[in-house]
Each structure stands twice: as C-alpha cells, then as structure tokens.
Amino acid sequence: MMVGEKELHGHTHAVGDDAPAVLPGDVAAARPVAPGLRRGAAGDLEELVRIRRDLHRIPELDDELPQTTAYVRGVLEGFGCEVFEPCRSTVCAYFDLGRSETVAIRSDMDALPIQEATGLPFASCHEGRMHACGHDGHMAMALGAARWVDRVLAGKVQGVSADMLPRNVLVVFQPAEETTGGAKRVCDSGVFQRLGATRIFGFHLWPDLPEGVLASRPGPLLARSSETTAVFHGRSAHIARWREGHDAVGAAARFVVGAKWLSRRLEQDEPCTLRFGHVVGGTVRNAVAGEATVEGSLRVFSDAMFDRARKEVGALAQTAADEEGCTFDLTFSEGYPPVINDAGLFARVRSALPGLAELPEPLLIAEDFAFYQQAIPGVFLLLGTGTGIPLHADTFTFDERVLVRGLEAYRLLLLMA
C-alpha cells in the first residue's frame, strides 16, 4: 500500500494519501486472549523483532527480491511444511493437515525506492531502498504465524493441539504490491484452487490508528484506484495574436476546476474522489499553449460508480475542450480493484477477534489484496502503530510490540471455525 506515486502497468498509481480513519469513541486497544496464545509472548516478541530487523536491513524492489525470498525460504524450510514458488518471486508455505479446506495468510515483501532517514541501528543496507510501508513487519507476523502452526503440529504449544486447527494452512509471501500487483499473478497461478483455499486474511500496519488497535469493516474497505489522464490538444499562437490559437492550458484549467465540482456531486451518492495533482502545458509565457496534460486519480468502490464517473469525466473534458476550440484524449488505468471484505467471513472475524474496531466508512486508498478477494472470500485488517508517521516517509518506523498483537490475531483466525 503506497503513499505517494508508483507505477502500475505504465501509469502512475497513488495510494495511501488520505485522512486518518475515524474510530468509534468507545473502541479500546483490547488484545485477544485465548488458551495457549498469550503464553510465551516475550519469546514471540524477540523472534518477531529479530525477523523484522533482519528484513528491514535488506529492502528490495518490485519482483527483484533475491535476498528477501532467500531469507523467507530459509525460515520456512526449518518447519514441517511444503515450501514452493507458484510464480516468480513468490514464496508459499503449505501445512497439509489432511483437511478438506485451506485457510491462507498473505504478506507482501517488496520495499520502496526511498533513502532511509530513520537513523536506526538496523537501517537499510541498500542505498536508496527502504521498507517504508511496513512490509518487513507484515513478513515477520506471517513467518511468526507459520512458526506457531509448526509448533502446534509438533505438540509444543500448551493448550492448542493440531486437531483444533480446522483447515490446512497456506502462507503466501508475494512481490510487487507497490508496483504491478503481484497478488494477481499469485491468483493466476491456480495455487488457491489446487490447495482448496476457501478464505484469506492479511494485515497492513497503520500509523493513524492507536497502537495495537485492529480495525476493519464489512464490505468496501479500500478503493479502486484508476489513474486518470487528460491531454488537451490546441493550437499555439503568440499571445498578441491569441485569437489565432486554441488554448490547451485554458481547457485544462476549466477541466481541473470542473473536476472538483464533479467530485463533490458524485460523493453525495457514494464515497469516491476525483482529484488532479499534476498539470503540464505550453512552452513559453507569451504563447497560447498548443498542448496541456492533466494527471490525477479517480477512487471508487463499485463498478457502477466507476462507469458513471468515467462517463461524466468524459463529458466534462468535452465541454472544457469545446470552450477553447480544442480536442482531447482521456485515459483511465484499470488499477487495483476495490478491497471488499466478505460480509459473512467478516462476521466470523468480528466474533473471533475481541476489540476489533469497525471503521464507519471505507478509505480512499488502494491495495492489491483486492485480487485475492476476487478469487476467494477474504478479510483485510489494519493494525495500528499509533505513530502518525506517514506510510512511505523516509522516517517510517513503529514500536515492534504491535507485531505481537498481529500474531495473536493470526492465531485466532487460524483457529476460527
């Protein structure tokens, strides 16, 4: 999940740049407690911290993750599971308990092209790369969950036995969440169908939630993000002879202002947003611009709103172009689908996780976990770090104790009927 800009199928993809989630006032950072889960928490923390810091030192980008995947495989191959690669730069661990169904856990692995400025003793060893979005923490929690399953199967967890796990367990470590949507390639590999996966869970560390708070909501949680580009074509002319030209910058200006009003009107019917943050046009100050490009993003939660918004943006661009005697080209990227939490599965999760906060509204950010939810029912959760340090900031870090909270939640989800 990204704060800022990223490339998705050749288009700029911006995510994670919205206001903090608002939680109900009476929500407390309650921690789930169940037999055999809280015992040994100090040992859990030590292990989670070690893994997180090891991975934090070796951030890698996109699909090029040789050190990261080698580390993940090195941990998993010490467990009683099948370790395999269903597609490029993806590592899976499968614990076959002989059940008819499988539950999946997902972690992303890729980092960001950011020069770290935390000053931490375990800061990135790779120049210009940093785990600034918490994926190192996500991997630590998922590896911790795999370790716990292995110990349960070996009879080493007091109060929890193998027969209490109702499903086989598949742990997925994917690449390219920040770029081209590695989740889709995992889905296309057929691994879920082959192993009978019927549900999937994932986490994202979230700075704007109080430390240790788990939050989510049924139905729409995160938005579909479509990168929107309008290019206006006019005719350049000296401003002393401006009537001979067709002002592309003027058309772009009309379009940008109109888009704000259009967005406000659409928001009255359904949460969405349309904003433009990059405009380039013209060549010199004393000539009517012959071309102008406007780049922004459309965020929606339904196909119906996506279709409606595209149609109305097209009409707006046409009006702006006509008023200046210009033509235009308008494009929308497909982007990531919206993250839609399965309502039935969410109801089970809410019962299984004491203290789970329910967000009153979906968030206008994007995450490729959405592809998994198109393949099988899934629930995505946010885990508060309480720092307020923005995702993708070069100073991003968190108190590693929150990882124990995530691990506890994973254990409860794996035990859930």
Image: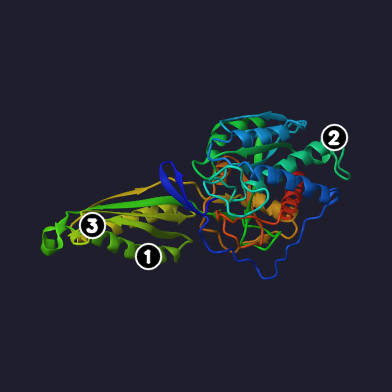
Looking at the picture, does residue 68 appear above or below residue 305? above
Q: Say left or right for 17 vs 160.
A: left
- Mark pair 2, 3: CA separation: 69 Å
Q: Counting residues from the N terminus, which is met first, the one under dot 3 or under dot 1?
A: 3
Q: Counting residues from the N terminus, which is met first, the one under dot 2 or under dot 3?
A: 2
Q: Nearer the viewer, mark 3 or mark 1?
A: 3
Disc 2 residue type (three-letter): Ala
Sort mark 2 into few (<14), some (14-19) or many (20+) by Cα contacts within 10 Å.
few
Q: Say left or right for 143 vs 192.
A: right
The residue to which callout 3 is attached is 248
Q: Is residue 315 visible?
A: no
Residue appearing at x 28%, y 59% in the figure? 252
Image coordinates of residue 52 in percent, x first then y, are 69, 46
Q: Nearer the viewer, residue 180 or 127?
A: 127
Outermost residue to the right: 158
Sort mark 1 into few (<14), some (14-19) or many (20+) by Cα contacts within 10 Å.
some
Q: Say left or right for 211 vs 156.
A: left
Image coordinates of residue 259 in percent, x first then y, are 35, 62
The residue to which callout 2 is attached is 154
Residue appearing at x 50%, y 43% in the figure? 179
**Image marks 3 and 1: residues in contact by CB distance under 8 Å:** no
Disc 1 residue type (three-letter): Lys
Q: Quadrant of residue 158?
A: top right
Q: Quadrant of residue 156?
A: top right
The residue to which callout 1 is attached is 260
- Res 370 label: none
Q: Classify the position of the C terminus by image quarter.
A: top right
Image coordinates of residue 332 in percent, x first then y, are 38, 48
Q: Nearer the viewer, mark 2 or mark 3?
A: 3
Q: Nearer the viewer, residue 268 or 90?
A: 90
Q: Counting residues from the N terminus, which is met first, the one under dot 2 or under dot 1?
A: 2
Disc 3 residue type (three-letter): Ala
